[in-house]
């Protein structure tokens, strides 16, 4: 498991093109649906940036960035599959909080995620983690 956690952390770090203090990743997996996104706080800033903003803000090559996104998603799905193979209850959502120091914490959720729309889910998640 530690190897997979490290893969996730490494991918997040590779995707952020500036100094940062913390990153909050949200992943969701159920039935035939999955999604992954993260917000990060640039160093000495109080406003979080959604990772989708990186390509425009920093003129990062979008094809290369999509490749990094795919590798991040693959690491998340590997984590999901590993837990299922260990006969643990499959999570429906996960939060991975990473500090620039390498320290991290992970939270799993098991509630039915299909009942809320994506905008509502994101708003509730951001509120729960005080992301602004």
Image: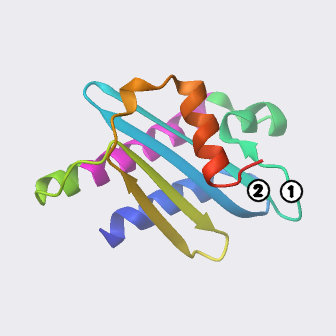
**Is residue 42 within the magenta segment?**
no
Residue 10 location in percent, x, y? Answer: 52, 61
Residue ID at (30%, 54%):
79
**Is residue 76 within the magenta segment?**
yes
Front residue of 123/59: it is 123
Picture quadrant of residue 33: top left
Which one is in front in this view, the residue at disc 2 or the one at disc 1? 1
Span shown in magenta: 63-80
- Residue 107 is tagged as none
- The disc, 2 or 1, on the residue closer to the chain's N-terminal end is 2
Residue ID at (21%, 56%):
82
The quarter of the image holding the N terminus is bottom left
Q: Is residue 55 left or right of residue 37?
A: right
Q: Is residue 54 left or right of residue 33?
A: right
Residue ID at (45%, 43%):
27
Residue 50 location in percent, x, y? Answer: 70, 40
- Give the CA separation, mark 2 to mark 1: 7 Å
Give above or below for 6 relative to 71. below
Give above or below for 121 relative to 86. above
Report which residue position mark 1 lands on.
Answer: 46
- Residue 41 is tagged as 2
Question: How many residues crowd around disc 2 within 10 Å: few (fewer than 14), some, or many (20 or more)?
Answer: many
* Label 2 SS: strand
Give above or below for 96 relative to 37. below
Q: Is residue 53 left or right of residue 37?
A: right
Q: Main secondary structure of the magenta part?
A: helix
Total tally of numbered discs in the picture? 2
- 2 and 1 marks in contact (CB < 8 Å): yes
* Label 1 SS: loop
Residue 113 location in percent, x, y? Answer: 39, 33
- Asked whether residue 38 is in view, the answer is no
Residue 77 location in percent, x, y? Answer: 32, 44
């Amino acid at each position: 498991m530690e190897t997979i956690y490290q893969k996730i952390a490494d991918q997040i770090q590779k995707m952020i093109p500036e100094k940062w203090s913390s990153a909050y990743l949200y992943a969701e997996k159920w039935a035939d649906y999955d999604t992954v996104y993260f917000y990060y706080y640039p160093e000495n800033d109080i406003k979080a940036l959604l990772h989708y903003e990186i390509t425009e803000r920093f003129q990062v090559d979008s094809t290369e960035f999509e490749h990094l996104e795919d590798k991040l998603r693959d690491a998340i799905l590997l984590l999901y599959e590993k837990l299922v193979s260990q006969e643990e209850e499959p999570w429906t959502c996960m939060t991975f909080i990473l500090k620039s120091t390498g320290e991290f914490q992970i939270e799993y959720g098991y509630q039915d995620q299909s009942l809320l729309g994506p905008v509502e889910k994101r708003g509730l998640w951001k509120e729960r983690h005080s992301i602004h």
